Image (spheres, grey):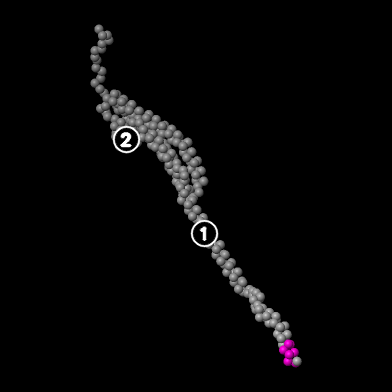
Amino acid sequence: MTFRRSRALVAAAAILSAPLISSVAFAPPAHAWRVVFDPSNYAKNVLTAARTLEQINNQIVQLQNEAQMLINQARNLTSLPYSALQQLQQSVQRTQQLLEEAQNIAFDVQQIDQLFQQQYGNIDLSASEQQLVAGARSRWQNTVGGLQDALRVQAGVVGNIETNRAQMSALIGQSQGATGALQTAQAGNQLLALQAQQLSDLTAVVAANGRAIALSEAERTAAAEQGRIQRQRFLTPGSGYQPGNARMFNN
């Protein structure tokens, strides 16, 4: 009886303890439910991420700067879409053509030397009165032609003023609206070309006026010499009056 009772108690204890053993056997380990937070490791990770982000931002800024530099280089290499060279050359050619159309004595050193020697040199004492008058008339024509040429050159230069004004206005507008260094430099060079063209016009006017004045002075000097010779001839004793036959009527 006692033995049976002992076996029954052992069996009951085994039955009651089975769920507990099962729960203990299949229960997860205690460390699987615990989250470990390491502040030092977290701070290092955050610092690393911040540094990485900063490097990326720096690279983005560098790329932006390089892109802007390329854009600026493209602008600096852009040519000026305007040129006043043709109009300026035409103005210079018009003034030069007026100088080349100089009458009688052109702007040529050899021709000037030759004609001055012929017309303004020493008056030939043996020349006839008719030759002296013809020479005086030729010199007068040279003077009048020089004055007319000077007036024509002046009129041509005045005609270029309006063209120069329009070109100057256009070039200044192009210079102010230039997008790069090349356009600015080209606009400045064309403004210098305009200034050079104006200086050439001024040189032409000075040369034409100087030529007219020189011809006038040369004529005056030659006329004084010719007057001296004619006066000398008049005062030089000759053969005197010689009577001759005169016919008053045809019959």
**Residue that carries the numbered disc 2 in the rendered image:** 112
Compare residues 214 and 182 and report the one nearer the observer.
182
| Left or right of residue 131: residue 60 | right
Which corner quadrant of the image does residue 199 belong to? top left
Specify whether residue 6 is painted magenta: yes
Rendered-image quadrant of the N terminus: bottom right
Callout 1: few (<14), some (14-19), or many (20+) C-alpha neighbours within 10 Å? few
Quarter occupied by residue 88? top left
Residue 204 visible: no
Q: Is residue 80 magenta?
A: no
**Quarter in which the C terminus is drawn:** top left
Residue 49 against residue 188 in the figure, above or below: below
| In the rendered image, the vertical position of residue 81 relative to residue 27, given as above or below | above
Q: Which mark is residue 237?
A: none
Tag 1 secondary structure: helix
- Give residue 52's position: percent from left, percent from top: 56, 66
Q: Which label belongs to residue 63?
A: 1
Image position of 66 (left or right of 27): left
